[in-house]
């Protein structure tokens, strides 16, 4: 079964990047970076970064089904 054309899904999948914070004393934090706007979106607990990725995947799956 072919998926519907959804360019926004391709853009969103590559738009955001979660990277570890490299500042001194901030090893337990991660930064959400917006590649399109070239800016930091949020700073989160590094342990939560996997949860953010899982939630994004679920939202993408929901949007594709709709």
Image: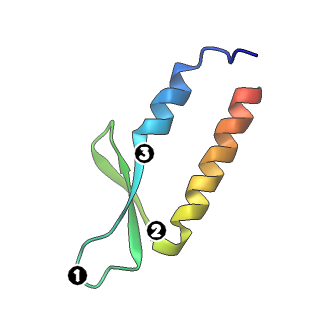
Q: Residues within 10 Å of mark 3 (few under 14, many from 20)?
A: some
Circle 2 crowding by C-alpha within 10 Å: few under 14, some 14–19, many from 20: some
Taking the spot 63% from the left edge, 54% from the top edge, the residue there is 54
User: Looking at the rendered structure, which numbered label has been put on residue 33?
Assistant: none
User: Which of the marked residues, 2 or 1, is nearer the chain's N terminus?
Assistant: 1
Of residue 45 and residue 19, the one placed in the foreground of this image is 19
Give the vertical position of 21 relative to 62 (above or below).
below
The answer to which quarter of the image holds residue 27 is bottom left
Residue at 49% x, 35% y is: 12
Q: Is residue 21 left or right of residue 57?
A: left
Q: Residue at x 41, y 38 (%)?
A: 15
* Callout 3–callout 2 Cβ contact below 8 Å: no
Q: In the picture, which quadrant includes the C terminus?
A: top right
Mark 1 and mark 2 in contact (Cβ < 8 Å)? no
Helix, strand or loop under label 1: loop
Task: Determine which of the numbered discs, if any, sits on residue 24 in the image.
Answer: 1
Q: Distance of mark 3 from mark 2, alpha carbons?
A: 14 Å
Q: Which image quarter holds the N terminus?
A: top right
Q: In the rendered view, would you say 62 is above or below 3?
A: below
- Considering the numbered disc 2 on the image, is that residue within a helix, a strand or a loop? strand
Q: Nearer the viewer, residue 10 or 26?
A: 10
- Residue 44 numbered mark, or none: 2
Residue nearest the viewer, comparing 10 with 31: 10
Relative to 5, is 13 above or below?
below
Image check: 49 left or right of 33? Answer: right
Q: Assign a secondary structure to mark 3.
A: strand
- Alpha carbon of mark 2 to alpha carbon of mark 1: how far? 16 Å
| x and y percentages locating residue 20 in the rendered image | 35, 67
Which residue is tagged 3? 16
């Amino acid at each position: 079964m072919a998926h519907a054309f959804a360019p926004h899904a391709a853009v969103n999948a590559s738009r955001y990047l979660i990277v570890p914070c490299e500042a001194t004393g901030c090893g337990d934090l991660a930064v959400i970076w917006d590649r399109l706007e070239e800016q930091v979106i949020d700073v989160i607990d590094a342990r939560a970064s996997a949860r953010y990725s899982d939630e994004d995947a679920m939202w993408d799956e929901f949007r594709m089904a709709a």
